[in-house]
Amino acid sequence: MVYTIRKTEPGDIQDILSIYQKARDFMAASGNPSQWTGGYPGLPDLEQDIAQGASYVCIQNDIVVATFYFKIGDEPGYHMIRNGHWINEETYGVVHRIAAAFPGKGIASFCLDWCLKQWGNIRIDTHRDNLPMQSLLKKKGFSKCGIVLAGDGSERIAYQKSLWPAD
């Protein structure tokens, strides 16, 4: 499969919203009905990600097959981590809201690899019931670091992968 990554364009919005809905349906069907609820993520979240220049899409044959948020820099929700610690305190890239139109096809894996090529120190978090994402992160060599709080105050399992040598 040949995938490419690019910044989200206005014409991608409906495709992304459809992917978000497919992801919510997939999560609910795989035992994780409470991670993305109440229409989250939705158009306001996507518009904010685009405005920040942090929204990306994965394209295959001119079709949007995945979306994710990626930025290099501080994530306020990661300042406090419980029951563990981050691998390092170097500048990191953050991945949020990664969702694929076709789960289990390696698209999310490709997106994570792309992020690591952009910046070799990545942090990401996921819901405790999101076993498919936890499995993917383990497979990709991410280390479980502890617990962080999402914007709504709920707990998320924090992961990090660094390609940089330890100090």
Image: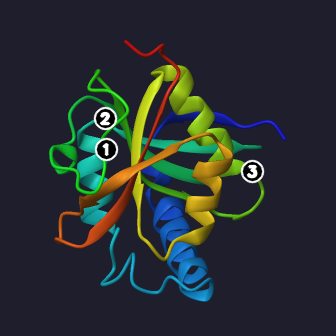
Q: Amino acid at mark 1?
A: Ile
Q: Earlier in the sequence, mark 3 or mark 1?
A: 1
Give the residue drawn at x 69%, y 65%. 103
Residue located beneath label 3 in the image = 106
Viewer-closest of 2 and 120: 120
Gap between marks 3 and 1, in whole Å? 24 Å
Percent position (x, y) of residue 110? 67, 40
Give the residue drawn at x 33%, y 73%. 40
Pick the quarter of the image with the N terminus: top right
Q: Which mark is residue 50?
A: 1
Residue located beneath label 2 in the image = 53
Badge 1: few (under 14), some or many (20 or more) residues near its Cα, within 10 Å? Answer: some
Helix, strand or loop status at disc 3: loop
Q: Circles 3 and 2: CB distance less than 8 Å? A: no
Drawn side of residue 46 relative to residue 113, left or right? left
Drawn side of residue 102 relative to residue 108, left or right? right
